[in-house]
Amino acid sequence: MLEVITLFLFNIVIYSVPLLYATSGEIMVEKSGSLNLGVEGTMAIGAVFGYLAGCHADSLLAGVLVSFISAAIVGSVFCLFTITLQANQNVTGLTITTIGVAVYFFIGNALGADWPYMRDCTRLSSSFNAIEIPLLSKIPLLGKAFFSHNILVYLSVILAVLIWVYFEKTVPGLRLRSIGENPGAADSLGVNIVRYKYLHIMAGSGIMGIGGYYMGLNMGGTFEGSNCWINGYGWIAIALVIFANWSTLHAVIGTFVFGFFNTLRVYNMPLATNFPNTLGWLSKVPAQFFSALPFIVTLLVLIVNSIRSRKGSGCPSAIGVNYYREDR
């Protein structure tokens, strides 16, 4: 029975990782004062191009770099329209999602039988194997669940911590936060608003792309003509930014909570079977409910955020508002 709990916790981490990448990237974007609703499409672009590059080079690192760069290019397109051309941020983000997912399906269907399989890329597959952290991985129950994962899992947590340190402890990070709060004041102090926004939105988008790439690898790189690897995770990540109160450290916990609900979709029956007295009721819940549960929680988060006080909120004051320097 303990093995069931260990596997349940292990899979919560697996489901949490792409959300952590996407949420951390979106937090960086929103801290600059921009609201990018194109997370889903950005992840899809990073996923497909990163996966194809990784398979072609038979290298995990090559896939990570290409997924980051391709998603960062998508971020630059968002910047071009919303910063340079002053287009509506919501419309631009939604367009990126639509086009990004469409590009994913277009490339996959166009390759058809030539679609590369991860199992044929030995170095890529071996690089994605679990790395056990000495001593910690031997802890009963929790060791395998939290300290026996592939390198991209550890990288997601490291990135979340580094981004928090960057925002809280460095001068460029504080300048970025000032842009998100009051771009006019930051501009008057000599901060280059356009450059800061471009660099950080592209970097945040690149991080989202790595999350998409991870999802592709975790699914064995199998392309289905009807289902996208991202499968709504981009939308959940946008809600998670609110749930985490715009803090990447809180996002580590927040994504774990959402990962828990997602894992129930797969492990409700094993839990009900092994713990019939306490969790037997899980077997009576329709499977469709567990599939919808992450999105239901997402909706509840948005509702609660809409009615709660902004006092103590980490939401940037100028988020979603285009900055016109002439109006300063």
Image (cartoon, rainbow, N blue to C red):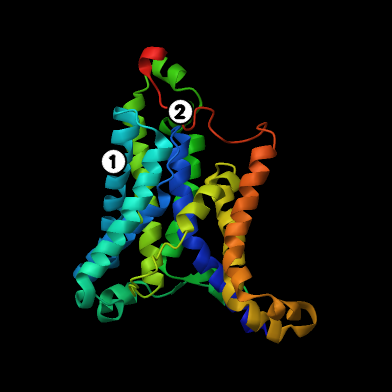
* Viewer-nearest residue: 118 or 42: 42
Residue 249 coordinates in the image, percent (x, y)? 56, 48
Tag 2 residue:
321
Q: Is residue 21 visible?
A: yes
Amino acid of disc 1 = Val
Position of the C terminus by quadrant: top left
Residue 35 coordinates in the image, percent (x, y)? 45, 38
Could you tell me if the residues under marks 2 and 1 are in contact, i.e. CB atoms within 8 Å? no
Mark 2 to mark 1 CA distance (whole Å): 17 Å
Residue 234 coordinates in the image, percent (x, y)? 45, 54
Q: Is residue 290 above or below residue 82?
A: below
Q: Is residue 62 above or below residue 2?
A: above
Residue 228 coordinates in the image, percent (x, y)? 38, 65
Q: Residue at 48% across / 31% down in the picture?
A: 177
Quarter of the figure with residue 106: bottom left
Q: Residue at 45% across / 45% down in the picture?
A: 26
Amino acid of disc 2 = Val
Helix, strand or loop status at disc 1 = helix
Helix, strand or loop status at disc 2 = loop
Of the two numbered discs 2 and 1 on the same chain, state the one appearing first in sequence.
Answer: 1
Give me the disc on residue 231. Answer: none
Q: Residue at 45% across / 28% down in the picture?
A: 321
Horizontal side of 233 relative to 261 (left or right) equals left
Crowding around mark 1 (Cα neighbors within 10 Å: few <14, some 14 to 19, many 20+) is some
Give me the disc on residue 77. Answer: 1
Q: Residue at 61% across / 46% down in the picture?
A: 302
Q: Is residue 63 visible?
A: no
Position of the N terminus by quadrant: bottom right
Quarter of the figure with residue 61: bottom left
